[in-house]
Image (spheres, helix red, strand yellow):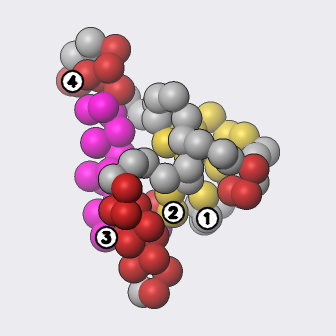
Amino acid sequence: MLNRYRQIDNWIADFQLPNSVWLGGLFNPQSFLTSIMQAVARKQDWPLDRMCLMVEVTKKQKEELQSPPKDGAYIHKYKTKLRFVYIY
């Protein structure tokens, strides 16, 4: 619970998307994924109802990430063999 608090507290400090998000630490991860899709749809002027999530596995470690991706989000601590996923 403390890790969840820290993630949210760090996030709201500057209201910018963190370099990497712990999806399991969110209270409603589905709403986060929907908001990522909405942000990309607005930026690219795409219809939201035609979008879907796409995952790209990388070998980057959380510490290597200096900024969030241009579109989407980096996810860490995913409970499979994936290290990071890039959602766009």
> Does label 4 or label 3 sit earlier along the sequence?
3
4 vs 2, front mark? 2
| Location of residue 38 (image quadrant) | top left
Query: Can you identify the residue that label 1 sits on?
Result: 77
Question: Mark 2 falls on what kind of element?
Answer: strand
> Residue at 30% of width from left, 31% of height from top?
39
Q: Is residue 14 above or below residue 51?
A: below
Tags 1 and 3 in contact by the CB under 8 Å rule?
no
- Classify residue 33 as left or right of residue 2: left
- The quadrant of the image that shows the N terminus is bottom left
Mark 2, Cα crowd under 10 Å, few <14 / some 14-19 / many 20+, is: some
Q: In this view, does 69 lie above or below 63?
A: above
Question: Mark 3 falls on what kind of element?
Answer: loop
The residue under label 4 is which amino acid type? Asp
Residue 50 highlighted magenta (yes or no): no
Give the residue furthest to the bottom. 2
Separation (CA) of disc 4 from disc 2: 26 Å
